[in-house]
Image (cartoon, rainbow, N blue to C red):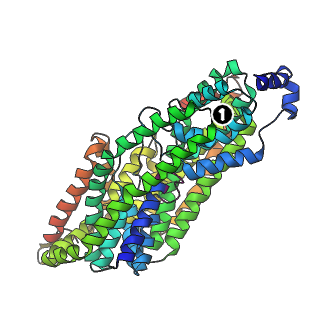
Amino acid sequence: MSAGKERAVGLDNPNTQAKGSYIKITRKDLNAVYWRLQIFGLGITVTSSNAQAIGFITALAPVLKKVYKDAGKAARVEAMQRHLTYFLSQNTATGMILGITAAIEETTEVDEKEAVVAVKAGMMGPLAGIGDSVFKITIQAIAGSIGAAYALQGNLIGPILMFLIYNGINIGVKYFGTIMGYEKGIEFVQSGEQAKVIQKIINISTMVGVIVLGALIGNYVKINVGTEIVINETVVNIQALLDGILPKLLPLLFTIGLYKLHSRMPRKYLILLIFGILIVGTLLAMAGILV
Amino acid sequence: MAVWQALLIAVWAGYCSFDDQGPQMLRRPLLVGPLVGIILGDVKTGLIISATLELMWMGLGNMAGYKTPDMIIGTIVGTTISITSTGATAEGIAAGVAAATTVAVLSQQLLLIFDFVRQFFAVWADRLALTGEFDSILMVNYVAIAFQFLLRAVPTFLVVYFSAGVVDKILNVIPSNILKGLSTASGILPAVGLSILMTMMMKGFMWPFLIFGFVASTYLGLGILPVTLISLAFAMLYSVMMEIKDRQNETPVAVSGRGDDEDGGYDL
């Protein structure tokens, strides 16, 4: 209760708050939040009933300890229960959610805490979308394909390069997301400009991702026809014929075909698809149709 | 294989298992597999099989409630089997891919059974909440790390230690043309990973960009890194151009940028 009163002084006068005279949470606390998110993550304690909430409160604990330092036990129990409610997002993007939540926890009165729940619930979905499409898929795929190019030649620089690209971006966003999320607070989510910036990041990374994807198809998918037809005693090599039209035409068509198939096929049949390709491919290769 | 090698591989599997859900710094075949190669003294095979699996499983990840094949145990067992059979030959890589795909599915089913153990964490955490001590929740995490470690370390040790000799014997029985066919077939598999990636990225009219990348690599013979850098410059330029166009459109009607965005969406 006494903590609530203390904070009320700051809240009554928004100017003092803006000048930073009232800020209690330090960079050191935010660093601790980042490190907990980095080490424990969100996944090891995932449950069906509250999803990643245990991971979230573990990372937020350094901030909560500070904010509720002078609060009574009842307030602390309530805070813990509040943050143990359902939370589901993506690891990298959660850095920013933690930062923003820290800012709101710090600036709200005891009876305004619904705001914390509302902001968390409002952000976890959209930020998970960005996290999945940018950090999990695009950057992981680009880093992985650059690394694979070296590793296939037996060069150890491959995995090292992949590790550096992938983690450099991921850890950077996780860390600066936590810091910036706190500093910009709620303003960051609410302003239309920020939504635009996020959209721009998604657009650029999707575009780079798709272009690289095109290059990957040509580089990594290997389908070569071994059949030769004899017409008027001249041997026609089908693969040479296809290469004359467009090099790597079959890999391109096959990948696009699979892409079209995915939109109709439930993902649970993916394993059957992989085994199907392995079996049919092996049979075709044994018959000499594929080399 | 010596016991210490199997133990080291099991410890690595346990750590990667924790990392996959915690720090998330490894997670992928190409980051998990090479160390197995180092432990078994065959770095080259380790790299090649890991890169092959990386491409095959590209775009796969646990999201939206869908559990993917267990890439960690799959990669570790696949790499081990490649190395202990014939090494960096077509047969060795084919055997590794076949083993990795099979084991990854089996392991995924096995791990699913243990999901119920985690439900206990929710009950425990709710109890701890009543104490009002924020850091008491750390204890749940320590237990979770131990659980996550054992989850993959134990089965990996059993499979790696006891299967090494067996796989070699099986490989000797299988006719060599089947193995050769299998290795040709595994050359097609990257198409699966790449097509999954496509389903996630091909929103709106993205085909010209895909073809651009394809042609840059097949006709111009550019590697992945130069293509990435060129496309990055290209995307930045495009984004700036779109911004200028947006601004021109916005001036007559002063509306919020939000509505424009939703319409524009992926209209790159």
Q: Is residue A77 above or below residue B221?
A: above
Residue B102 lies in the magenta stretch: no
Category of crowding for the residue at label 1, using alpha-carbon neighbours closer than 10 angstroms: few (below 14), some (14–19), many (at least 20):
many
Chain letter, disc 1 residue: A
Is residue B24 shown in magenta? yes
Q: Position of residue B267 (x, y in %)?
A: 53, 38
User: Is residue A71 visible in the rendered structure shown here?
Assistant: yes
Quadrant of the frame with the C terminus of chain A: bottom left
In the foreground, B49 or A141: B49
Magenta stretch: give its range: B19-26
Q: Amino acid at mark 1?
A: Thr
Residue in the foreground of this view, choosing between A104 and A57: A57
Number of on-image labels = 1
Q: Nearer the viewer, residue A136 or A220?
A: A136
User: In the figure, residue B251 lies in which quadrant?
Assistant: top right
**Image spot of residue B57 (x, y percent):** 37, 57
Residue B217 is drawn in which quadrant?
A: bottom left
**Vertical relation: A32 (above or below) B44:** above
Q: Is residue B15 left or right of residue A181?
A: left
**Seen in the image, is B67 located left or right of residue A189?**
left
Say which quarter of the image contains residue A24: top right
Measured as percent of width and height from the top left, residue B5 is found at 38, 76
Q: Dot 1 corresponds to which residue?
A: A101
Residue at x-position 54% and y-position 32%: A84
Mark 1, secondary structure of its residue = helix
